[in-house]
Each structure stands twice: as structure tokens, then as C-alpha cells.
Image (cartoon, grey):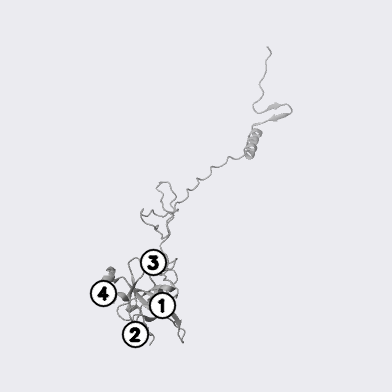
Amino acid sequence: MGKFSAPAASSVKMGNFSSTPSTVARNRVLESCWRKPESSPLPPTATPLCPTSISSSPHSNPFLITRPKPAENCPWDAFGAARLSGLQAPKRAGATQPLECVVGRVVLLPGQQLIPTTSVVHRQAQGKPWEHPQVITKTWVDGNGVRLVKLRTCTSFGGEGITRKKEHQRHYFVEAEESQLTRESDTFTKQTYVNCSPGAEFTAEFEHLALWPGSAKNAIQFSPAAVVGFNKCEDERRDSCN
């Protein structure tokens, strides 16, 4: 066989083209520039925060703040918001239903020390009507634009009932029966009597009264016929404005 000589390493001819080491390197650089870059991995999705839980993972984000878990029997979370358990937040003090000046409505006469000394009630009220439920029997506005009401005291006699009164006085106290209330009215939680004794009705400024707290759902409202009956029970009714 004849002798063949290998081509020089510095030059390899392919058709009309020649490839040198510098050309190969340049082609590899161009190929790397046009190659599609590999997609970088997406950052892990943050876990949604639960308002009443706290993450205990050692790899959790230290900048994410979660609310501490409250006690099971607590209707609030640690930030004062109502828990998402379907329970309604209790009403704040003073956020009760509005008080209406209506004949037959049961209201609260506050403690004597809570009413200004200039109030007419200090001259009109007899006995101990303070901090007792009162039924409005009449309403009007005087010449100075002040709304006044006449009241009759409701009492349960300390929970002991009518037997606490002397027998000859019992007929002046009318038992507050459910039939005397309107259909939408709430009821008393204790057996209650309306004081219809002579001179027991007295005057007070409506602005000093409050909603009777014993009514859980709605206000306690006597029917018009019941109010008329209370007034008829008084033998000698006198005008409490004098």
C-alpha cells in the first residue's frame, strides 16, 4: 500500500472550507450566546396566613407575622377582633337599642345620685323608686321644650312577691301579666307588679331615663288598655306636676 501522510493538525479542509482551532472556539461561543437560557426555579409560594394560628416551621419567613392562637372558649382573638366562628361580638356598653318616649314603655329610673339635683324627679318621687323599672303613663313637652313623663314604679318586692305587702295594700298593686303586653314586647324575668297606689305616679324628665336592662330581646311595652287600667286603680289621683 502506498504511504499516506496525515494532514497537519493546524489545518483540516472540508470541501471549500477550512476549520482552524480559533474558528471552532468562536463557533462554540456563538452557540452558547444563542442557546435558550434555562428557566430559574420559582421562589416557594408563601403559605396563606391563618388569623388564629402561628407557624412553627423552622424555615418560615421571619418577616411574616401571624396572630397568636386564643383560648378555645374565648370569642375574641388576641387583637380584639371577633373570631370567625359565626358568633357575634357582644355589644359594647351604651350601644343598646334607642329609647323611645312612648306611653306604656318600661324604662329605668337610675340611681338618685346619678340624676342632677335640679331635676323635678327629686321633688316628685316618693318611697324608693330608684333603680327600678318604671312604666310611662303620660308624655308631654313643657313651655321650655323639655320632654316630661309620668311614671309608675314596677316592683317584684325583692323577688318575694305580693305577699310581702300588707293585705290591705295589695289591691293597689296590679300584676304585670303577659296579656297586658303588646305582641312584640319582651317579658319581665320576675313576677312584677305595677304600683297604682294613690299619689304613686310622679314626674321626671325623659332625658334622665334609660332603657330597662331586664329586656333581653325587645323593649317591654304595655298595651294602651293596660295603662288605662293602671290609672283607674288609683282612688284619688292627683296631678304630680303640682
Question: Which residue carries the number 1 mark?
Answer: 137
Mark toward the start of the polypeptide (2 vs 1): 2
In three-dimensional space, the C-alpha distance between marks 3 and 2, rounded to whole angstroms, equals 33 Å
Compared with residue 3, is residue 172 higher up or lower down, i.e. above or below? below
Q: In this view, does 239 lie to the left or right of 32?
A: left
Q: What crowding class fits label 3: few (fewer than 14 Cα within 10 Å), some (14-19), or many (20 or more)?
A: few
Instruction: Evaluate if marks 4 and 3 touch, with contact meaning CB atoms under 8 Å apart.
Output: no
Mark toward the start of the polypeptide (1 vs 4): 1
In three-dimensional space, the C-alpha distance between marks 2 and 4, rounded to whole angstroms, equals 29 Å
Report the mark closest to the observer, 2 or 4: 4
Residue 218 in the image, given as x and y percentages of width and height:
42, 66
Residue at disc 1, secondary structure: strand
Q: What crowding class fits label 4: few (fewer than 14 Cα within 10 Å), some (14-19), or many (20 or more)?
A: few
Q: Residue at image x 26%, y 74%? A: 167
In three-dimensional space, the C-alpha distance between marks 1 and 3, rounded to whole angstroms, equals 18 Å
User: Disc 3 marks which amino acid?
Assistant: Glu
Residue 72 in the image, given as x and y percentages of width and height:
36, 53
Mark toward the start of the polypeptide (1 vs 3): 1
